[in-house]
Amino acid sequence: MDDAALIRPQVAALKPYTPGTTVAQAKKAYGLSTFVKLSSNENPLGTSPRALEAIRSLRDLHIYVDDDHAELRERLAAPYGLEARHVMVGHGSNDVVRTLFTTLIAPGDEVVLADPTFSLFAKDTLLFAGVPVKVPLRDGVHDLDAMQRAVTSKTKLVVVVDPNNPTSTRVEEEAFERFVRALPEGVVLLVDQAYREYMPPGSVEAAGYVARRPATIVLRTMSKIYGFASLRFGYALGDPQLLAYAERVRVPFGVSRPAAIAALAALDDRDFLERSVATNEAGKAMLYPAFERLGLQAYPTAANFVALSVPPGTRDPYEEMLRRGVVTRSGAALGMPGRLRITIGSPDQNATLVAALESLVAAAA
């Protein structure tokens, strides 16, 4: 039997998502006893202690979770003057994206997005036979004017990832405001703010547009600053009528009881949030002068990672960093050749990173 004949052509044309190299994989491949993992934008402080304490006492895992998550949705909505009906939850924000694309994208619909940006948006567009319209970044930042010009009568969705992944950059408030005002009201604006808590003062708060512009959806996750990377919890803020359609195709019980209970507890963990931001700011203050000293350029970051240039002539910087005991993400694999995407880590991790970069620069000299 020809299995390929059974597969939808949209699926057959896709490539599997490739996650970052794990420490175990790196140790096996390179024979080193220790590695610093700076490839997946994880919180170096770990997981919210309040979240961990909340799930430590769980005993009723044999009981289905209340799939409405009313209290949790109310808590998530309240900071923005919204209600529970403005929130849809999921097994990480990627799950929420798939639900939204299932709801919105029909064959031939155009989705305008930056290039490069988070890869799953283009992938999910193709999965539903939509057309990704990729607009190149300008100096590592979303070119909102060019994205506006790319909108046509076939455009269903415009995606803005802020801060952008993989470049770590943010859009300016005034530029974003002009962009939103110019968008046709029938075009859905999807703003992915997975790293919102790390952003500096004066950054775009996309959740504030949900009540003002009904065709606006904002994505958030607890995988990053709250340390839920393997627990998985994400959500969307949006117009209740629009989200009600998405609820029709949302996978039931997609959010586990541990994830829901941990998320509710983490929302009260202000101390952990503040320590995480402070650790990230200290990391930036240590790393950027080191990058300048080494002659390496990183875009100004609004997240917990950097997009760093590599020494000219370095054949495979990703592999070279692995040989030096540091796991990063290959910029070439993420659409930005000549760069590495590197998580801002703990002080010790950052020191190890700088030492590896010093060795890399010296080898390229």
Image (cartoon, rainbow, N blue to C red):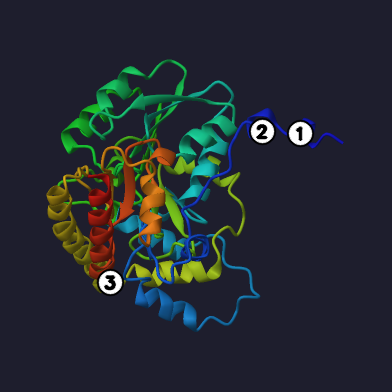
Look at mark 2 in the image and give the residue it sits on: 12
Q: Which mark is residue 39?
A: none
**Would you say the residues marked 2 and 1 are in contact, meaning their CB atoms lie under 8 Å apart?**
yes
State the CA–CA distance, disc 3 to disc 1.
49 Å
Residue plotted at (14% across, 58% down): 285
Q: Residues within 10 Å of mark 3 (few under 14, many from 20)?
A: many
Residue plotted at (16% across, 45% down): 295
Of 360 and 83, nearer the camera is 360
Q: Residue furthest top?
A: 153
Q: Residue furthest right?
A: 1
Look at mark 1 in the image and give the residue it sits on: 4
Q: Is residue 83 above or below residue 278?
A: above
Q: Secondary structure at mark 3?
A: helix
Q: For marks 3 and 1, give the one nearer the viewer.
A: 1
190 left or right of 28?
left
Look at mark 3 in the image and give the residue it sits on: 272
* Mark nearer the N terminus (3 vs 1): 1
